[in-house]
Image (cartoon, rainbow, N blue to C red):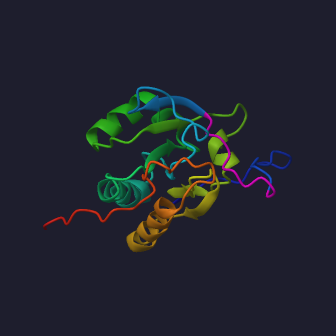
Amino acid sequence: MQRARPRPAGREATMTAPETPLAPELAVSEWFNTPAPLTLAGLRGRPVFLHSFQLLCPGCVAQALPQVQRIERVFAHTDLQVIGIHTVFEHHAAMSPVTLGAFLHEYRLKSPVAVDLAEEGSDIPVTMQRFRLRGTPSSVLIGRDGTILHQAFGVEDDIAVGARIAMALSATAGDGACADGRCAAPMPPVVEP
């Protein structure tokens, strides 16, 4: 795992206030694997699994990204939206968008990936600040209503993550966005070894 360095005094991370539990919006400089930019507001009504990573983070490459690929495979038949956030807080020159594009191709990562927006004068990118992520890998599960259901630093057990995602899929959004039946979580197909 890679920990982000603490922010200098007077430069506190921003996040929505506790009385407004909606997930903060993503701050993105570039997108990969999507024809159009995504917003959390635009995805309201669908559960969202955000995974924050760096391409030079050993824990991300060895554990977190393979877990994300398993999540995509198991929940492919649902309306779960998986989004990667490339949150570069160190080795900035080595992890350019060009390098990220090659990395995504080589590792066959197909879900949308955002490049977290750099903030002038800070090593910590904007989305990482807004969500108060402590390092990489990190994950955030957002419910259909746009609230943060769970947030973690490091790689969690597949069964625990899958159970949380299944619960988020089975919930209905307060705005009626699930009236078409997409909130039902059908059993995944049996995969033969």
Percent from the top left, x then y, of residue 9? 84, 50
Residue depicted at 33% across the width and 33% down the height: 102
Picture layout, residue 191 above or below residue 173: below
Quadrant position of residue 108:
top left
Marks counted in the figure total 0
Magenta residues (range): 18-27
Give the x, y percent position of residue 150: 59, 64
Which is nearer the eye, 146 or 121?
146
Q: Quadrant of the C terminus?
A: bottom left
Q: Is residue 157 left or right of residue 127?
A: left
Q: Residue furthest right?
A: 10
**Is the magenta region chiefly helix, strand or loop?**
loop
Q: Residue at x 65, y 55 (%)?
A: 147
Which residue extends farthest left?
A: 193
| Residue 33 position in % (x across, y down) | 38, 33
Residue situated in front as seen by the camera: 36 or 151: 36
In the rendered structure, the answer to whether residue 10 lies left or right of residue 162 reads right
- 7 in the magenta segment: no
In this rendering, does residue 76 appear at all? yes
Residue at 39% over, 69% down: 158
Instruction: Please state the horizontal and vertical placement of residue 97, each as a whole percent of the image.
Output: 45, 30
Residue at image x 22%, y 62%?
189
Q: Is residue 25 within the magenta segment?
A: yes
66 is higher (above) or lower (below) than 121: below
Residue 51 seen anywhere in this rendered image of the structure = no
